[in-house]
Image (spheres, rainbow, N blue to C red):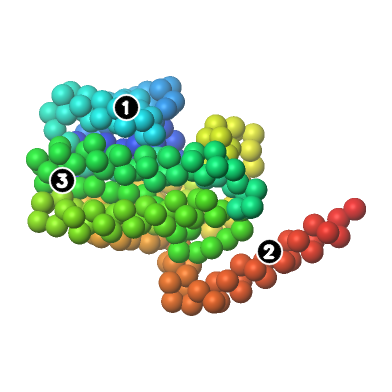
């Protein structure tokens, strides 16, 4: 087992479920002391109990990433309680799903407030502590940053913006000792499909993502933990995600053709029903 996480105080936002929870469990298994943040306290407490049952050490720090004061208070609690901060992982996010012509200003603000501004504030609030420890800052992006698709315009835009923020911070922090990693997962098991456009979790919502392409969250967490520990700049996974990102950057016309062809088929199918 890798020991690169041993003793590292690690803060993960959006850690109550999905990728964030799996990442908390994984880095704890590798020796990290984990502070988990999110809005649902019961979920955070369960993650802490699971880590402690396995012999690890964890701290639940409820936090709303859209509130700068809440994030600053979370960092203060972590440093005061655990003594330092070595790693900050901006993972909190959700997806607003609708055609762009149907999105309201409120929809855009909810999407960008969480996925973009929230992540940027995670970095801002953590940086002083991370510079003290010459630590690691990581962002969880998405292959959607590279690949256009119907109904995910707001989400894709937020993840493209997050990539730009990470790249900018990588330049701004050069020489500080703080590394910046941006990770773009493909399809990974999570609750993202069960969160509606208001940011509210609804377990009855169906996950329509392709199950045959879905990675389990624990497998994704191992890849992510390795990338952050190694201080890599940018990582894309799964295999389908890597292909999509490559095509989106180098053969955008082909991606557009595939996306519009798929959209046409769906519209034709819908028009023939009934």
Instruction: List x then y, in percent, for residue 16.
Output: 41, 32
Give the CA distance from mark 2 to mark 1. 41 Å
Task: Find disc 2 in the rendering and name its residue.
Answer: 263
Task: Find disc 3 in the rendering and name its residue.
Answer: 135
Q: Earlier in the sequence, mark 1 or mark 3?
A: 1
Task: Please tell me how crowded label 3 is: few (under 14), some (14-19), or many (20+) other residues with Cα within 10 Å.
Answer: many
Secondary structure of the residue carrying numbered label 2: helix
Q: Quadrant of residue 184?
A: bottom left
Q: Earlier in the sequence, mark 2 or mark 1?
A: 1
Query: Is any part of residue 231 visible from this angle?
Result: no
Q: Are marks 1 and 3 in contact (CB under 8 Å)?
A: no
User: Is residue 25 depicted above or below 79 in this figure?
Assistant: below
Instruction: List x then y, in percent, for residue 172.
Output: 18, 55
Using the image as rendered, state which of residue 151 and residue 22 is in the foreground: 151
Task: Find disc 1 in the rendering and name its residue.
Answer: 70
Q: Quadrant of residue 56?
A: top left
Using the image as rendered, state which of residue 19 and residue 55 is in the foreground: 19
Of marks 2 and 3, the one in the foreground: 2
Give the CA distance from mark 1 to mark 3. 22 Å
In the visual, does 196 lie left or right of 224?
A: right
Q: Quadrant of residue 171?
A: bottom left
Give the CA distance from mark 2 to mark 3. 44 Å
Q: Which residue is at the far right?
A: 274
Secondary structure of the residue carrying numbered label 1: helix
Q: Residue at x 79, y 64 (%)?
A: 268
Using the image as rendered, state which of residue 271 and residue 168 is in the foreground: 168
Using the image as rendered, state which of residue 11 and residue 21 is in the foreground: 11
Q: Are marks 2 and 1 in contact (CB under 8 Å)?
A: no
Instruction: List x then y, in percent, for residue 170.
Output: 22, 57
């Amino acid at each position: 087992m890798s020991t690169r996480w041993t003793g590292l105080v690690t803060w993960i936002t959006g850690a109550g479920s999905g990728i964030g929870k799996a990442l908390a469990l994984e880095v704890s298994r590798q020796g990290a002391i984990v502070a988990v943040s999110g809005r649902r306290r019961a979920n955070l407490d369960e993650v802490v109990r699971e880590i402690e049952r396995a012999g690890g050490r964890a701290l639940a720090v409820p936090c709303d990433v859209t509130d700068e004061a809440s994030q600053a208070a979370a960092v203060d609690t972590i440093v005061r309680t655990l003594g330092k901060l070595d790693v900050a992982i901006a993972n909190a996010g959700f997806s607003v799903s609708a055609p762009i012509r149907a999105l309201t200003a409120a929809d855009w603000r909810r999407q960008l407030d969480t996925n973009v501004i929230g992540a940027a504030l995670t970095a801002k609030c953590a940086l002083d502590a991370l510079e003290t420890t010459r630590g690691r800052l990581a962002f969880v992006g998405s292959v959607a940053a590279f690949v256009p698709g119907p109904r995910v315009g707001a989400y894709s835009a937020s993840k493209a913006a997050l990539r730009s923020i990470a790249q900018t911070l990588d330049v701004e922090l050069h020489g500080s000792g703080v590394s910046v990693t941006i990770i773009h997962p493909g399809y990974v098991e999570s609750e993202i499909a069960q969160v509606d456009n208001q940011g509210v979790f609804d377990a009855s919502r169906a996950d329509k993502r392709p199950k045959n392409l879905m990675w389990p969250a624990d497998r994704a967490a191992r890849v992510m933990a390795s990338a952050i520990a190694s201080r890599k700049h940018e990582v894309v996974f799964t295999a389908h995600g890597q292909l999509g990102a490559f095509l989106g950057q180098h053969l955008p016309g082909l991606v557009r053709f595939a996306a519009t062809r798929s959209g046409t088929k769906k519209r034709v199918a819908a028009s023939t029903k009934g």
